[in-house]
Image (spheres, rainbow, N blue to C red):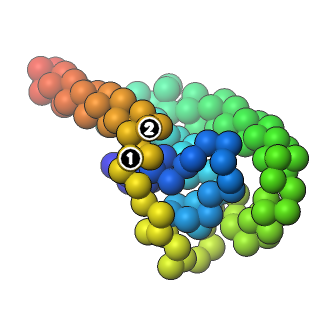
Amino acid sequence: MSGFGNSQLGSRHVEKSAEVTDVGPYALIRNPLYIGSYCMMVAFCILCKDWGSLAFVSGPVLFIYYLQVAHEEVFLAAKFPNSWTQYTRDVPRFIPQHLSNRMLAGWSLAQWIDNREYKALITSVVGVMAIYCWLCLVR
């Protein structure tokens, strides 16, 4: 659930293509959506006891995310040369180094809806319920 929460919190702060977002989870790490979705995939694999999928998520998916982040950072550096450079100095890419008082700043339900993150919420809830039902039937 922490992966889902991180992903959802991150999406509430993103105003795509407007400016560098440095509040909410973006005050702790530069890629909370990727970290959140990665944690959700790992959690689903563990919940299902699907060790083959866990190996796939832990290797190739993590590598694909890393390549995607590197690509996006080149784009963002070109689009926001001053603010992006300062942001990369202040905020680590994946692993938080400290807590920030900007963690809860700028939270917006309207932005969360505009980014259509409710779809991830619905999908995750249905997925967890389906796995729970399946595990109850198998036992």
Q: Residues within 10 Å of mark 2 (few under 14, many from 20)?
A: some
Question: 31 or 11: which is nearer to us?
Answer: 11
Question: How far from the left and from the top, in percent, is residue 135?
Answer: 19, 27
Q: Residue at x 38, y 39 (%)?
A: 113
**Relative to residue 91, is residue 93 depicted above or below?**
above
- Is residue 70 at least partly visible in the picture? no
Residue 74 location (% of width, % of height): 85, 44
Q: What crowding class fits label 1: few (fewer than 14 Cα within 10 Å), some (14-19), or many (20 or more)?
A: few
Report the Cα–Cα distance between label 2 and label 1: 6 Å
The residue under the point 58% across, 38% down is 58
Quarter of the figure that contains the C terminus: top left
Q: Which mark is residue 114?
A: 2
Does the residue at mark 2 contact the one at mark 1 (Cβ under 8 Å)? yes
Say which residue label 1 marks: 110
What residue is rendered at 55% in x and 65% in y?
A: 23
Left or right relative to 108: residue 121:
left
Choose top left, top right, bottom left or bottom right for residue 17.
top right
Q: Is 130 placed above or below 41 here?
A: above
What's the residue type where badge 2 is placed? Answer: Asp
- Is label 1 in a helix, a strand or a loop? helix
Label 2 sits on a secondary structure element that is helix
Q: Residue at x 56, y 32 (%)?
A: 57
Closer to the camera, 34 or 9? 9
Residue 80 image offset from top left, x and y in percent: 81, 53
Left or right: 78 in relation to 97: right
Amino acid bearing label 1: Ala
